[in-house]
Amino acid sequence: QVQLQESGPGLVKPSETLSLTCTVSGASISAYSWNWIRQPAGKGLEWIGRIYTSGSINYNPSLKSRVIMSADTPKNQFSLRLSFMTAADTAVYYCVREVEGAARSFDYWGQGTLVTVSS
Amino acid sequence: DIQMTQSPSSLSASIGDRVTITCRASQTINNYLNWYQQRPGKAPNLLIYAASNLQSGVPSRFSGSGSGTDFTLTISSLQPEDFATYYCQQTYTTPRTFGQGTTVEIK
């Protein structure tokens, strides 16, 4: 069974950098694409970016200047770094698997981790 | 970016009702359209992929249709566990984008 688990700090100070890691079990991160999604309280879903099988990375243009994603294949983990955090970045952050090909969809999600930006 | 617009933003319905939610893309996305259900405090759950394909384990009362720019999610007979927020998403291109969500409430 595929499982994804986010880990990282729940509280980040303004202007600091958020670092989150997603640990994947039941599937190899060398296959599929792996995404980060976030959701502010009471609001909709925002795609942050993805890293995929070829090693290529796509970022949301709205966040591109502040985001870095990476993967650690031996550990079967992928990570997100988001710099210059502000209150607007307070949200639940999800790591998500994306099926590639004609059925492109997000089929497995982590439970989500709440990140609050506050001094 | 491709904009995804859902309607309605919310609706009230009764158990057993047929419910339809629509999603419109700002440009053609072929059939790269997915539907998710999100219950409060939980991660979204994939219901329909590629516009009309039922994800494994999802009840058959859920169905999807459409192609190009206009898509529909239908719940044939609303059940208590279906009261939730539903999102459409395009995976035609990056950035991946979602609709704003449709909340289905109990009448």
Image (cartoon, coloured by chain):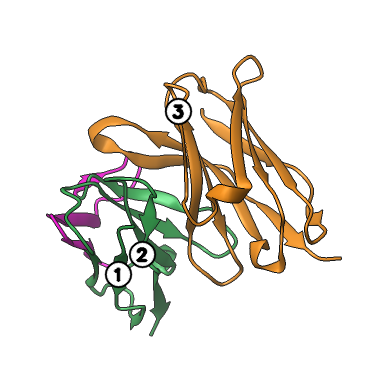
Chain colours: A orange, B green
Q: CA distance from mark 3 to mark 2?
A: 26 Å
Alpha-carbon neighbours of circle 3 within 10 Å: few (<14), some, or many (≥20)?
Answer: few
> What span is colored magenta in the figure?
B52-77
Q: Amino acid at mark 3?
A: Ser
Alpha-carbon neighbours of circle 1 within 10 Å: few (<14), some, or many (≥20)?
Answer: many
Q: Is residue B96 left or right of residue A69?
A: left
Q: Nearer the viewer, residue A1 or A108?
A: A108
How far across and down, in percent of the image, does residue A25 sit? 59, 25
Using the rendered image, report if marks 3 and 1 lie on a common chain: no
Q: Residue drawn at (25%, 66%), measured in percent from left and top?
A: B23
Per the image, the residue denoted by label 3 is: A56
Q: Is residue A42 left or right of residue B31?
A: right
Subunit of label 3: A
Which residue lies most toward the left here? Answer: B67
Q: Residue drawn at (71%, 57%), measured in percent from left and top?
A: A85
Q: Give residue A115's quadrant in the image.
A: bottom right
Q: Is residue B81 above or below residue B19?
A: above
Q: Secondary structure at mark 2?
A: loop
Subunit of label 1: B
Q: Is residue B55 above or below residue B12?
A: above
How far across and down, in percent of the image, does residue A37 sit? 53, 50
Numbered badge on residue B99: 2
Q: Is residue B72 above or below residue A27?
A: below
Q: Quadrant of the C terminus of chain A?
A: bottom right
Subunit of label 2: B
Q: Is residue B5 left or right of residue A89?
A: left
Which residue lies most toward the front here? Answer: A65
Which residue lies most toward the top here? Answer: A74
Per the image, the residue denoted by label 1 is: B5
Q: Secondary structure at mark 3?
A: loop
Q: Amino acid at mark 2?
A: Gly
